[in-house]
Image: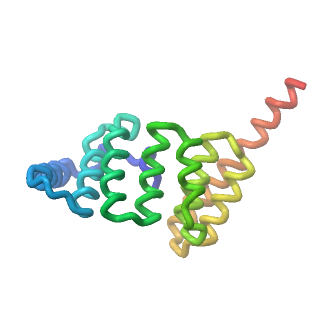
Amino acid sequence: MRLPDRDRTLWNRDLIDEGQTLVRACVRRDAPGPYQLQAAIAAVHSSAATASDTDWAKIVSQYDQLLTLTPTPIVALNRAIAVAEVDGPQVALTLVDDLELDSYYLWHATRGDLLQRLGEADEVRAALERAAELTDNPAEQALLAERVSAQLAAVPLAASRWAGSA
């Protein structure tokens, strides 16, 4: 399930509070490592009541730090997702397209999300279908198929709007 679609009222606040206490203790040591930074990113996510309330600029900053310690394409992909919330989907898509992750289904799913936000219907379907092909996880395949179906259902509406303006 995508982050904006999650029901945060179901999250275990006691465990979140405990985790955030541990992260704050680690931050006070001022010797960040990759796991501490990943925990700090999770703490920012879990402290927001909704996805739109998330301090995305802080998450980008934390990913910048993580990227210096763990310069992997996966970290860069996750950073690009946060960048999309701060600087917009076009900036993030440029970052994503520079990554060599063509065989990684979440790269294609991320591209699909960004392309959808940019209104690129045909490219969205192709990206989501490719993501579904690359994962063996039935739950992920179902979510991706649902997103493709939703995209297909939206296309006639968009086409009918254009037809009336000719």
User: Which residue extends farthest front?
Assistant: 68
- Left or right: residue 106 compared with residue 122: left
In the rendered picture of this protein, how many numbered marks are placed on residues?
0
At 55% from the left and 67% from the top, the residue drawn is: 101
- Residue 22 visible: no
User: Which residue extends farthest right?
Assistant: 166
At 30% from the left and 37% from the top, the residue drawn is: 49
User: Which residue extends farthest bottom?
Assistant: 136
Is residue 113 positioned above or below 142 on the image? above
At which x and y percent is residue 22?
12, 55
Render colour scheme: rainbow
At which x and y percent is residue 13?
20, 48
Quick one: 57 or 71, which is closer to the camera? 71
At 43% from the left and 46% from the top, the residue drawn is: 82
At which x and y percent is residue 23?
16, 53
Q: Quadrant of residue 128?
A: bottom right
Where's the C terminus, which quadrant?
A: top right
Q: Quadrant of residue 118?
A: top right
Is residue 119 positioned above or below 74 on the image? above
At 54% from the left and 52% from the top, the residue drawn is: 95
- Residue 66 visible: yes
At which x and y percent is residue 164?
86, 26
